[in-house]
């Protein structure tokens, strides 16, 4: 979800009345709450943007919450709180082993849910710079610390220099970076000579691999920038 829009919370719960109640209970000025009742819709939402936290009901009409949780954890780094009527120890263990960050059984107190949600969001916030450098927007998802790069959910292999270039561009998105600045920051191995077209070649390859011709802009006579989305 767009960071500028606020903290994004996605609630996946097929009971529409309960989902609406959860959304009202968790709503604050700096939060954007979205709800959906089926996994099919949840997958579509995740393709559009990653939330900051997910509340996931285990029993849904079109799939198993545990299986979906494992699917989510392969591509996402946000906390997930499982919500279920099952209070058996085996279900709790299964949820935690599948990657759940917390587990709440029905019936439950909204005050308790709010506290659990606040705890997960606080942990993420307090981790701050210690967390992995993950950027997720539109069709792109980049985890720089794990050296994992995805376009439309598909992994893309990048060379070391392409990785450096991408990170610099993304971390400075919207800003024009001069050619000499990029060359100096990418080729930092002490080499005295860098081919004149080395940067141009790296930019072209990166554009092609990421299908990012509309994202990586050439600012003629100056340098390059990663176009920042507005809205």
Image (tube, rainbow, N blue to C red):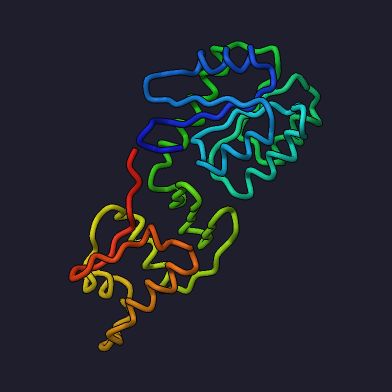
Query: Camera-side residue: 175 or 72?
Result: 175
Picture layout, residue 167 above or below residue 17: below
Query: Camera-side residue: 90 or 37?
Result: 37
Query: Camera-side residue: 92 or 187?
Result: 187
Q: Position of residue 192 (x, y in %)?
A: 25, 88
Which residue is painted at 53% across and 26% down in the image? 34
Which residue is painted at 27% across and 88% down in the image? 193
- Residue 171 left/right relative to 127: left
The quadrant of the image that shows the C terminus is top left
Across the whole image, how many numbered discs are drawn on residues?
A: 0
Which residue is painted at 32% across and 42% down in the image? 230
Which residue is painted at 52% across and 25% down in the image? 117
Q: Position of residue 167 (x, y in %)?
A: 38, 61
Picture layout, residue 66 above or below residue 175: above
- Residue 113 left/right relative to 170: right
Q: Position of residue 39 (x, y in %)?
A: 69, 34
- Residue 218 left/right relative to 164: left
Q: Position of residue 156 (x, y in %)?
A: 55, 65
Picture layout, residue 169 above or below residue 119: below
Picture layout, residue 207 above or below residue 112: below
């Amino acid at each position: 979800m767009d960071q500028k829009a606020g903290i994004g919370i996605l609630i996946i719960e097929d009971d529409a009345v309960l989902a609406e109640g959860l959304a009202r209970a968790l709503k604050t000025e700096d939060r954007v709450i979205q709800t959906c009742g089926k996994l099919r819709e949840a997958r579509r939402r995740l393709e559009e943007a990653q939330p900051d936290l997910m509340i996931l009901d285990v029993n849904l009409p079109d799939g198993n919450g545990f299986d979906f949780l494992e699917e989510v954890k392969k591509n996402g780094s946000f906390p997930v709180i499982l919500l279920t009527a099952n209070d058996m120890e085996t279900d709790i263990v299964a949820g935690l082993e599948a990657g759940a960050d917390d587990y709440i059984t029905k019936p439950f107190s909204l005050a308790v849910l709010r506290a659990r949600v606040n705890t997960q969001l606080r942990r993420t916030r307090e981790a701050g710079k210690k967390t992995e450098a993950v950027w997720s927007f539109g069709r792109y998802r980049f985890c720089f610390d794990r050296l994992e790069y995805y376009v439309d959910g598909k992994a893309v292999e990048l060379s070391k220099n392409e990785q450096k270039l991408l990170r610099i561009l993304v971390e400075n998105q919207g800003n024009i970076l001069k050619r000499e600045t990029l060359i100096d920051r990418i080729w930092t191995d002490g080499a005295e000579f860098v081919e004149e077209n080395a940067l141009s070649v790296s930019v072209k390859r990166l554009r092609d691999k990421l299908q990012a011709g509309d994202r990586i802009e050439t600012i003629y006579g100056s340098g390059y920038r990663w176009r920042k989305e507005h809205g």
